[in-house]
Amino acid sequence: MNLALFWGIINLENMTEINLESLKIEAKKELENSSDLRQLEEVSKRYLGKQGEIARILRSLDGLPKEKRAAIGKQANDFKNFINLKIEEKTKELKEKSGRGLGSKEWIDITAPGRKPSVGHLHPLTLTRRKIEEIFQTMGFSIIEGPEVENEWYNFDALNIPKDHPARDAWDTFYLKNGMLLRTHTSPVQIRFMEKNNPPFRVIVPGRIFRHEATDPSHEFDFNQLEGLMVGEDISAANFKAVIEEFYRRFFGKQVKIRLIPSFFPFTEPSFQVDMSCVNCGGKGCPACKHTGWLEMMGAGMVHPNVFKYAGLNPKGLTGFAFGMGLERLAMMKYKISDIRLFRGGDLRFLQQF
Ligand SMILES: [Zn+2]
């Protein structure tokens, strides 16, 4: 073998190795410094193009022995893959970067249908309350409101529940530090209204009430009550029955029967529990009514003469009825809701159904 040629081959081989290593470092630097896709394209062309560095190296291998050629060819190929991979990464990076500022350059299809804004809707309790108010208004009832923070006089004493009366224990009350309390029912508004208005009148009082109770599917510590009061000269339990039957018929949209069962409340005498024929089964019996055909709906009664007195009215010749029902309970029956806690749970899957 020609010695000179032998050395030449060695030199060429060494040179190629050195070239590849330094080229790799150089290429890496150039790729990293590319600040846009055009620059990147130039770097790609310089190394991978037909007249590029890799093509030049491969061409210079002519005349080398087969194994050497293969070895350097493989290195050149690795180098090519390395550059391709780097370019791919850098392209992605640059595209992401420029994408952030694309908003102004982006093409907008003005014929595409617009995105509908979501309008929202009323809460099921608001729907229920409005429906109730509408029905009672058509029967001549006015809607009145009162404070949610009350004193003991309006919440208890004036409603014929003296301090030592065991009935006071039936209301689990939230007391405030200043001696006030969160009203446990809407009945205090009866007193507040009668202090300022002379009979005859008929009013309903929807509103929030608070009881210190543990929550479960049918109990909340913060819920809504609907109070009713009708006072005049010859108001009887028969009037009450007619008004309530008509209310339920319109609220549930079907004919219902009601029955009055003797009960006790300090502020009414006589007092009754009001049952309604089950709207679910029509009175035949089903799980909703525990197979009795009846649903317990509310407490009611004829206004106690003491309550008139405490409100500053002369009870002589004055009669009236009062009732109180839970707004949530009515909504639960109307919409077949199984858990009272859903109303304030904030779960959109529940709320979006209304
Ligand atoms: Zn039933």
Image (cartoon, helix red, strand yellow):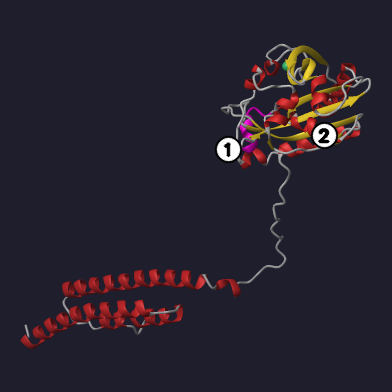
Residue located beneath label 1 in the image? 177
Name the secondary structure under disc 1: loop
Side of 302 relative to 180 (left or right): right
Indicate the quadrant where residue 254 lies: top right
Pointer 2 local density, CA inside 10 Å: few below 14, some 14–19, many at least 20: some
Indicate the quadrant where residue 261 lies: top right
Side of 101 relative to 275 (left or right): left
Query: Looking at the image, which is closer to me, 324 or 303?
Result: 303
Disc sitting over residue 193 in the figure: 2
Residue in view at x 31 percent, y 79 percent: 29
Q: List x then y, in percent, for residue 262.
A: 77, 11
Side of 135 relative to 168 (left or right): right
Residue in view at x 60 percent, y 36 percent: 176
Residue flagged by tag 1: what amino acid is it? Lys
Residue in view at x 65 percent, y 69 percent: 108
N-terminal-most mark, 2 or 1: 1
User: Which quarter of the rendered image does ligand 1 occupy?
Assistant: top right
Query: Looking at the image, which is closer to me, 131 or 107?
Result: 131
> In which quadrant is the C terminus drawn?
top right
Residue 340 sits inside the magenta stretch:
yes
> In which quadrant is the N terminus drawn?
bottom left
Q: Judge whether residue 179 can be spotted in this image.
A: yes
Q: List x then y, in percent, for residue 76.
A: 26, 74
Query: Looking at the image, which is closer to me, 108 or 168?
Result: 168
The span picked out in magenta is 337-345
The mark tally for this picture is 2
Residue in view at x 39 percent, y 72 percent: 90
Pointer 1 local density, CA inside 10 Å: few below 14, some 14–19, many at least 20: few
- Asked if 12 appears above or below 183 in the picture, the reply is below
Disc sitting over residue 205 in the figure: none
Q: List x then y, in percent, for residue 46.
A: 35, 83
